[in-house]
């Protein structure tokens, strides 16, 4: 692996929470607990919801993020970013191309893209992505149609490949990550992690997020 340090996003983007509805918690419940636990980056992900429902939840989430001084990202729906006053959008591999989203939103909005390979990450970078959500680390039940899992070796390989091409874009690991994985994942050279299930499935989601915030603050990059 290259000795060139991997870039970071900002202090918020190093730890991201992806919303997910469970039998126990609503989307807003999960976001509220993540924010209370100290996370300052929330991605609103509502795959099966229509635009009206996303707008309703998104307006509430925007207020919550404002109170917590947190970044709010919308999953997929570029057309809702400005209406919700979100800070940006995250786009999957089959969603709108990042280049097109950038033309619509301009430079003032954050745009992230999902990648499973170094080639996909490099393509997102060339289309002006601000960060790459790279995964899945391992199998996760919070997302359907998973790409092949990467594991630690996969992250090392992607970071190494991007370094060789002199591509400097933050890589955020995602997919089935637990608190016990953080040190090993961050040691691969990625810039941050994104969590969902490991927080919502814990006995005390707020405490779980607090513990992970402390852990991330102690990670040396």
Image (tube, rainbow, N blue to C red):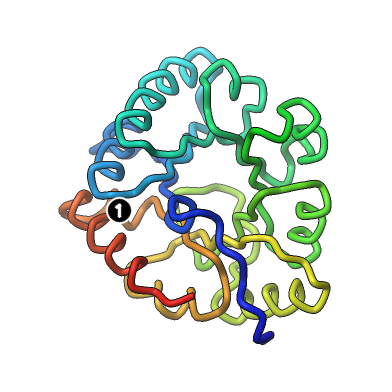
Above or below, comparing residue 32 to residue 211 in the picture: above
* Image-based side of 97 in relation to 16, left or right: right
Please name the residue shown 82% across and 39% down the image: 99
Please name the residue shown 64% across and 65% down the image: 148
Residue on which the image places disc 1: 199
Above or below, comparing residue 137 to residue 207 in the picture: below
When asked about the image quadrant of residue 88, the answer is top right
Above or below, comparing residue 4 to residue 50 in the picture: below
Classify 10 Å Cα crowding around label 1: few (below 14), some (14-19), many (20 and above).
Answer: many
Quadrant where the N terminus sits is: bottom right
- Residue 189, how many percent across, how many down? 57, 76
Callout count: 1
- Residue 131, how many percent across, how many down? 64, 53
When asked about the image quadrant of residue 132, the answer is bottom right
150, 207: nearer the viewer: 207
When asked about the image quadrant of residue 152, the answer is bottom right
61, 25: nearer the viewer: 61
- Residue 114, how many percent across, how many down? 65, 51
Please name the residue shown 80% across and 72% down the image: 166
Above or below, comparing residue 110 to residue 202 in the picture: above
Residue that protrudes farthest toward the top in the picture: 52
- Residue 86, how many percent across, how many down? 52, 28
* Image-based side of 125 in relation to 16, left or right: right
User: Disc 1 on helix, strand or loop?
Assistant: helix
């Amino acid at each position: 692996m290259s000795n060139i340090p991997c870039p970071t996003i900002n202090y918020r983007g190093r730890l991201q929470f992806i919303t997910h509805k469970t039998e126990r918690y609503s989307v807003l419940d999960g976001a509220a607990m993540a924010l209370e636990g100290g996370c300052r980056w929330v991605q609103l992900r509502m795959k099966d919801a229509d635009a009206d429902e996303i707008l309703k939840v998104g307006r509430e989430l925007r207020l919550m993020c404002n109170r917590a001084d947190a970044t709010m990202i919308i999953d997929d729906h570029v057309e809702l970013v400005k209406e919700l006053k979100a800070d940006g959008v995250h786009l999957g591999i089959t969603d709108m191309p990042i280049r097109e989203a950038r033309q619509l939103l301009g430079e003032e909005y954050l745009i992230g893209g999902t990648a499973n390979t170094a080639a996909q990450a490099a393509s997102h970078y060339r289309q002006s992505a601000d960060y790459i959500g790279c995964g899945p680390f391992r199998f996760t039940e919070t997302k359907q149609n998973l790409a092949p899992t990467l594991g630690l070796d996969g992250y090392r390989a992607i970071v190494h490949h991007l370094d060789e091409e002199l591509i400097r874009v933050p890589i955020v690991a995602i997919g089935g990550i637990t608190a016990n994985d953080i040190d090993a994942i961050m040691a691969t050279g990625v810039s941050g992690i994104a969590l969902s299930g490991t927080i919502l499935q814990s006995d005390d989601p707020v405490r779980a997020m607090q513990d992970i915030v402390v852990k991330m603050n102690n990670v040396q990059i």
